[in-house]
Amino acid sequence: MRKILLHLVAGVLTVMPQAYASAPASGPRTAWITFTLPNPQVTPDWRNYAPADCASNPDQCAQDHRFWEEWDLNVFSGAIDASFAAVASEGKYQGVMMLMPLADSTNFWNNIQLTYQAAAKYGLEFEVVLFPKWKYGAEWCYLYTTNASSSCAIAPGTTTAVANVQLLKMMDFVENLSGSCAFKSYNRPIAIWYGWNEFSPGYELLKSFWQSLPTGGGGNLQAAYITWLDEPFAGTPEVRQLQTWVEKRNQPYSVNTELYSTAALQKYQSTYAPYQTIITGAWNAPDVTTWAQLMCGYWRMVSQPTRMGVWTFYDKDVGYQEYYRAYLNNEMAVAGALCAY
């Protein structure tokens, strides 16, 4: 859902096809937990640590790029460590996905490094989900490698959007957190938000952006890139058009789709298969058993997809609250047993 930096945690549930080749699967065998900050479990009392320019309204800062850019997450290192330890101890979650904006500061880069190291400490895989926000102009400005629109900040002496320059800087940083990438490979996927009511980029711009992503020794960013679509944009035609074009060149192109309604699940469950992750959730379940039973219905409705995701924690601190959560009454639903409760 489009409450960026208000979501808390999602688990992206991943099932290998053989998990249900011979018999119906009760749920995914592996899963991801996705953290969105701030939230009271991972960054407790975060308002008390607001920098001077955010002290009068820390909630406003938390809803744009400034939480990641100006807060020092070292203050919360103990809580972050405990949260990642809990994910690892559950046993069914293989990694964490960190939702963050596009920003640039010493704290920003240090915060990414800190969360990556916390994941690595517990053997958890690490993935960035980038919801760019509007620090460098309109959110879609990251798409412009040349001829950037008037809604974008422009890199001096070029026609390239500053957002595009910063995006490539961030992608390169994330890919090399654990050391240099092998030639033409990548270390971890990076999902990026796409889809806006007020602007439609179109196929040519999306294709140009994808083609501009480096593929050499610094990391194959074309292969690392995932398009993230909220439910209203799940049928965006240029995304499927580009996926088809890329697949004809014997390359995968992955897409994450947020699908919450029965109609959306039925309509878009396989639009981007086999490289599709479905993100969904059960609204306001009172306990993990009820949640799992509701999710089991989704699981069966979409024919036990190769990849499925659910929101795990919900926000208690900032803005509009969403209730697609699987962590209930201090208990987390078991990822591998959706239909076994």
Image (spheres, grey):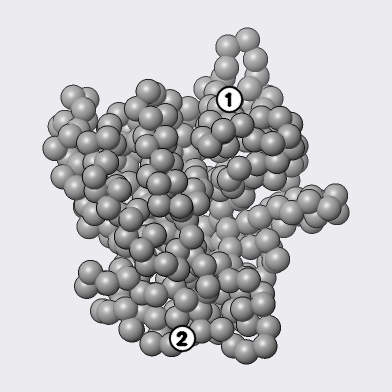
Observer-nearest of 100 and 142: 100
Amino acid, disc 1: Val
Residue holding disc 2: 339
Residue holding disc 1: 165
Badge 1 or badge 2: first in the primary sequence: 1
- Exactly how many numbered labels are in the figure? 2
Q: Position of residue 179 (x, y in %)?
A: 57, 33
In the picture provided, is 268 more to the left or to the right than 11? Answer: right
Q: Secondary structure at mark 1?
A: helix
When the figure is inspected, residue 33 is found, relative to residue 337, above or below; the finding is: above
Q: Quadrant of the N terminus?
A: bottom left
Residue 237, picture quadrant: bottom right
Instruction: Residue 8: tell me if it is visible.
Output: no
Q: Residue at x 43, y 41 (%)?
A: 116
Amino acid, disc 2: Cys
In the picture provided, is 57 more to the left or to the right than 195? Answer: left
Q: Position of residue 257 (x, y in %)?
A: 56, 61
In the rendered image, the residue lying farthest to the top is 157
In the picture, the disc for residue 146 is: none
Q: Residue at x 42, y 29 (%)?
A: 109
Q: Secondary structure at mark 2?
A: loop
- Mark 2: give few (<14), some (14-19) or many (20+) Cα within 10 Å: many
Q: Residue at x 20, y 42 (%)?
A: 46
The label nearer to you, 1 versus 2, is 2
Q: Position of residue 249 (x, y in %)?
A: 85, 49
Q: Quadrant of the C terminus?
A: bottom left
Q: Residue at x 57, y 37 (%)?
A: 175
When the figure is inspected, residue 250 is found, relative to residue 222, above or below; the finding is: below
**Marks 1 and 2, how far apart at CA:** 45 Å
Q: Position of residue 67 (x, y in %)?
A: 31, 36
Observer-nearest of 234 and 77: 77
Instruction: Residue 230: tell me if it is visible.
Output: yes
